[in-house]
Image: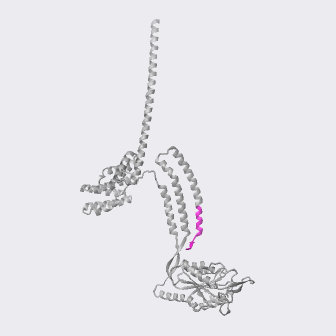
Amino acid sequence: MNFTCQRPQALYAMLLIIPAVIIAAVQYRRLVKRIKTITVKDSGSVQVRRLKTLGVSVVLRSVFLALGWILLVLAYAGFSWGTYLEPVQKSGSSVSMVFDISYSMNAEDAPGSLTRLEAAKRYAAMLLSHIESTSLSVVIAKGDGVVVVPLTEDRAVVESLLESLSPALMTTGGSSLGKGIRAALKSFPANSSGRNSIWVFTDGDETDGLLEGALMDAVRTGISVYLIGFGTERETKVLAGDGKTYVMTALRLERMKAACANAMKKNYSSNISELQIAYVDATEPGSALQLLEPLKSNARADLAFDEGEKSVSYEVKPVQRYPLFLGLAIIFFVLSFVVMELNPDGISERIHKSNAVMLVLLPLIFTSCTNRVTGAKTILDSTWSWYQHRYNDSIAGYLRTACDAQTDGDELLEQYALYDLAVTYLSQNENNAAMERFRQINLRTSAEVGYATSYNCGIIAYRSGDYNSAAYYFKEALRIDGSKLDAKVNLELSLKNAEKEAKAKENAISQVSESNTAGSMERAVFERIREYDKKQWKNSENSENSGTASDY
């Protein structure tokens, strides 16, 4: 399984996470300091408990955002692994001739005491005379691969090039058949609808080991490759490129066969005759037919295609994995928002609109009564308006259904209509109107309606700060259905808040009582002082009067 990446330069975008993490860390430290300051002053309220978990939520949000960004970058980079077969309609044929012009091709072990390169020239010239309607390109391969004749139908250009083929045409040392095949692949037009083939004239004596990888590339693009071998497997002495050193060379038959087999095995599992990666021995009788027969079958297929018959071939395409990375990125981005909305300690104020399924079944349950069917249909329409937030339309429908059901004496349908009407008022924060409608509902009508009614009444009481009433309603809801977690949590919160409220009132009364006692004591002391002063004043007045009478 081969991993490929279309845009590896996009991976540099991951470096943006580094400044983002630094900024997030600074903000997190500031947030922790603010939370500590607040929690020292008040550590018992629901809001403070929420603040204590806010730090964890911020960290998780940062992690999810970072992972989402990484996956988004990977999706854009275009990673792919695995292959699949894609059917295509093809017409026409093209051949790219790759000539190995390395110095090993100068070995004189071809039939007739010819050099391998000379034998390749004559073999190619023979093939040219049988492919008049095929487009051709020519690539020379040595230490590199170069397209010397682009795709053309001019046979004269190709034939003139064959006469001048020589190792001296390229100065690059070594022998790279893989680079020659990759250059041939590039010589074909992109998104070509023709049947393309590559003929490699070589002895297989490469020096860089890129042959097998290039054959895999050809398989993935749906192009057949034929390695045409020249020479013998007996080691032969040949002069190297420096003109002084002699090296031993031979036809690397087994090496080329193994490369072809491995390329087909790793990338191609279906038996489709249109695609071939094969070795052809130029000295075997009928070897030319093995190369020309696919072109003739292509010509017959083109004729059938022109006559209206379908000619389908297959190309091996890599499986693009960007949907996987993109989907995971979206999930992590959503989680980054969800984690900030979690409220582990707050009251669950989810309004119960739980009888929607039952309302859908009403027309089927009450088919014996035309009025009930009509009322059920009206409730369904109004419920749909409720989910679309068209509350005025839903209120009108519920009121009409409740009035008609009361006139017909249908208590069950009336209770459903009253419940839905109360829920609609509650959705608009009309708590008093909602509570008035909830009180008109008979809790024994339906267990589900009874639970939802008591639960929603508890929500209204909690919103208004009446925690004792809220606890009472949540208890009533749990008596009807004790398996609901929301009611259990809200009951605990209501009881805690009611207890806090009671303690606060006791403290206030105690403070008032103490202040009243201190005030009465102060008044008593001041009263005694005033009486004492008054008595003193009277005594002084009497003494003055007696003295005056004697003097007079």
**Residue nearest the viewer, comparing 309 with 462:** 462
Q: Quadrant of residue 176?
A: bottom right
Residue 284, above or below 222: below
Residue 323 at x, y percent in the picture? 50, 69
Tell me the quarter of the image containing the N terminus.
bottom right
* Left or right of 332 on screen, residue 15: right
Residue extending farthest front: 234
Residue 210, above or below 133: above
Q: Quadrant of residue 267?
A: bottom right
Residue 301 at x, y percent in the picture? 49, 87
Q: Is residue 11 magenta?
A: yes
Q: Name the residue rendered at 50%, 78% in the picture.
A: 85
State the count of labels: 0
Q: Is residue 449 visible?
A: yes
Residue 56 at x, y percent in the picture? 52, 54
**Residue nearest the viewer, comparing 162 with 545:** 162
Q: Is residue 541 magenta?
A: no
- Give the residues in magenta: 1-16
Q: Name the residue rendered at 43%, 30% in the picture.
A: 517
